[in-house]
Amino acid sequence: MRVMVLEDDPELGPVIAAQLRDAGFAVDLARTLAEADLKLSVNRYDCVVADRSVPDGDSVTLLAAHRRAGSTLPFLLLTALDAVSDRVAGFEHGADDYLVKPFAFAELVVRVRALCRREQPARPSVLRAGDLELDLPRRRVTRAGVLLSLSAKEFAVLELLMLRAGEVVTRSELIESCWDEASEPMSNVVDVLIGQLRRRLGPPDPIATVRGVGYRLGGDA
């Protein structure tokens, strides 16, 4: 799942992005409304986390503009404004959630994950493909009953492959869903990660390479 964070604080912004990446999200960071609006026009996101007060205005204006355009993209607003009237104004302009500073990063991660799930098609909380089992709520992966240790990025890639089990998932789809602007799409970042994931899963290899296109979970590897 890919998230955009709009936060102008030079210390807090990168920390929020790092915490969300550690939780398995791909994260793009914007520092102004103009930069955020540009990213929203060219990238597909599952959620936006926006500080209300940024140098070029109030994030509520960005939120309201996207709601008028018919966007249902979830917005979580961050703010030091804790008055009831401020929170009500945010919700009236279309905010999906509100978090007052200072906040616990663990709570932010849980709230973002819940908002991302709201936009996803209904799906089971446990995915199964062959002898692989991926438990989304507990962030656990087992193979033939053996618990595996996966990084957040490996988990994200495997989740997408299992959601599309039997189908070819292109490299560009993996990049769009599991990486952010900090990655280099033309590099071999996807191939390296798939190699790491194969080593984690062990033999027999459940991931088939479709040359020149991408990968498929289930099929002759």
Image: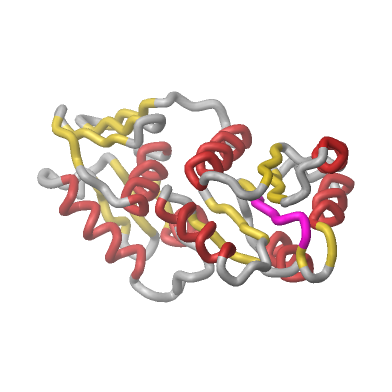
Residue at 82% x, 36% y: name it: 84
Residue at 42% x, 37% y: name it: 163
Residue at 39% x, 32% y: name it: 136
Tell me: residue 142, above or below residue 4.
above
Q: Which of 66 and 104 is in front in this view?
A: 104
Tell me: residue 176, above or below residue 189.
above
Q: What stretch is highlighted in magenta?
A: 48-53
Report how many numbered discs are placed on residues in the image: 0
Q: Give the image location of residue 217, x and y in percent.
A: 30, 43
Q: Nearer the viewer, residue 79 or 146?
A: 79
Q: Which colour scheme is used?
A: secondary structure
Q: Which of 7 and 185 is in front in this view?
A: 7
Q: In this view, does 215 lie to the left or right of 108?
A: left
Tell me: residue 143, above or below residue 182.
above
Q: In this view, does 116 lie to the left or right of 94?
A: left
Tell me: residue 133, above or below residue 71.
above
The reply to whether the magenta stretch includes residue 102 is no
Q: Give the image location of residue 178, x and y in percent.
A: 45, 55
Q: Is residue 70 left or right of residue 43?
A: right
Q: Is residue 207 left or right of residue 2?
A: left
Helix, strand or loop: magenta stretch: strand
Residue at 34% x, 30% y: name it: 135
Q: Nearer the viewer, residue 28 or 72?
A: 28
Q: Give the image location of residue 4, x and y in percent.
A: 62, 57
The reply to whether the magenta stretch includes residue 51 is yes
